Amino acid sequence: MVDVILGLQWGDEGKGKIVDYFAPQYDIIARFQGGPNAGHTLYIEDKKIVLHQIPSGIFHQNTLNIIGNGVVLDPVTLKRECDAVAAFGIDVKKNLFIAERTNIIVPTHRALDKASETSKGLEKIGSTLKGIGPAYMDKTGRNALRVGDLLDKNFTTQYIRLRLKHQKLLDNFHFDEDISSWEEEFFEAIDFLRSLNIVNGEYFINNHLSKGKNVLAEGAQGSMLDIDFGTFPFVTSSNTISAGVCTGLGVAPQKINQVLGVTKAYCTRVGSGPFPTELTDETGEELRRIGNEFGATTGRPRRCGWIDLVALKYTCMLNGITQVVLTKADVLDAFKELKVCTAYNIKGEIKEEIPFQMARIKMEPLYKSYKGWNIETTAIKGAASLPANMLTYIQSINEYIGAPVKYVSNGPAREQIVVL
Ligand code: GDP
Ligand code: IMO
Ligand code: MG
């Protein structure tokens, strides 16, 4: 069967750590969407590593990792990352696979991303500028180059043709930066990519499934950044929800078993767009400081606020969440009072549903308050040792969202996780 781990908020919920924790239980770890906009942090032998393109199971010698067709792949980032994991003794030629239908991010996609964001001025999305939007536009526009095309002798001609199309768009944006050094890096990385295991992803996964192997699909971004259901237009360009697993890997819906949703015990967002429970006061600053909330991909400070249960219940519904992993619970250790948003006041009406256009309406979050636990929890190993006030806080989340919190993460290290 295929199990799924994905983010329930606006990304950076700690998916990387959680995938790394569960990886030994699976034969294959598969990324199904997104690209180098993702930054998944792992701690391996006390060293921090951030993965953007490679699945977070790569540090387990007996696990195969595949970049699925739903991903957009930047060869330059991939090459850099392969070098970084090789330093830990990992042989990517042995346990990393790339689906031939995966779409390639070319240098002009990054240029287009930048030009498009600049043209939006104050309305900008706050993109990571990794070329994600333009790359997915070329996929749906049926222009894209795919990993399988690398093996075609006409690849360079196809590339030049696409580049010319992009140049016209860049001219419209009056974009005149010199990107020749990006192209040089790109072609070096393309040669490297050709030397990796390029496979037919859908047969690779389904053949393993029919032999009884287990697959874990690793989501990037979060459900509130989903292209259809997120806070449009302040979203990413892929389906980040569990439905994306089917199209992003080529597996049928009946093959999907557990869907684990990862949420922080509070909430963060990086980039622009609506965030009803955002705290722009000292409490928000404290969350950022204690949680070290700075983007793993761009280093930007993350906006911080209380957990939003209305949004969480919505994303549990969209994904069919069977179990919840609550991360960064330890960040709340020092807070005297904790708040959870249970409804919105929209023009005097109390609403418990996500509206069509969060970006255009004023929403006031309505909170319930809980007492903090004010005990250091980072060394706790068993559920019985968790503070009573934390269990009350978790119980309130379970009741509201209708899905059980089964794991509490109490620190960034692999072993800092408590099973409830
Ligand atoms: P991802 O994109 O969902 O994989 O999350 P990121 O790696 O972007 O951000 C999560 C950050 O929180 C990383 O710096 C992790 O090392 C860290 N982290 C993960 N789980 C915990 C936890 O339970 N407690 C604390 N304090 N940090 C955590
Ligand atoms: P992980 O996998 C948090 C945000 C960007 C921006 C919007 C669109 O680490 O959780 P894009 O680059 O896709 O055009 O940006 O989405 N964003 C993320 N925020 N975590 C991520 O990934 C993100 N990937 C994109 O900040 O607001
Ligand atoms: Mg991240």
Image (tube, grey):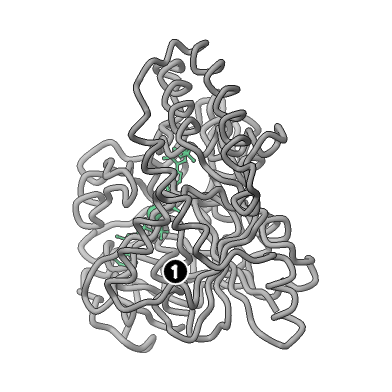
Under tag 1, what secondary structure? loop
User: Which quarter of the figure has residue 249?
Assistant: bottom right
Percent position of residue 138, x then y: 64, 34
The residue pinned by badge 1 equals: 56
Mark 1 Cα shell of 10 Å, populated few (<14), some (14-19), many (≥20): many
Q: Which residue occupies the extreme front position in the image?
A: 153
Q: Nearer the viewer, residue 138 or 129?
A: 138
Quadrant (top left, top right, bottom left, bottom right) of the N terminus: bottom right
Q: Taking 333 as reference, is 315 left or right?
A: right
Percent position of residue 347, x then y: 56, 25
Residue at the spot 45% in from the left edge and 64% down from the top edge: 15
Residue at the spot 38% in from the left edge and 60% down from the top edge: 51
Residue at the spot 29% in from the left edge and 75% down from the top edge: 88
Q: Nearer the viewer, residue 271 or 279?
A: 271
Q: Amino acid at mark 1?
A: Ser
Vertical side of 15 occupied by 238: above or below: above
Q: Taking 100 as reference, is 169 left or right?
A: left
Percent position of residue 404, x then y: 56, 73
Vertical side of 329 occupied by 214: above or below: below
Q: Nearer the viewer, residue 329 or 194?
A: 194
Counting every numbered tag in the picture gives 1
Quadrant for ligand 3 reads bottom left
Vertical side of 268 occupied by 372: above or below: below
Q: Is residue 341 visible?
A: no
Q: Nearer the viewer, residue 363 or 250?
A: 250
Q: Taking 237 as reference, is 298 left or right?
A: left
CB of mark 1 near ligand 1 (< 8 Å): yes
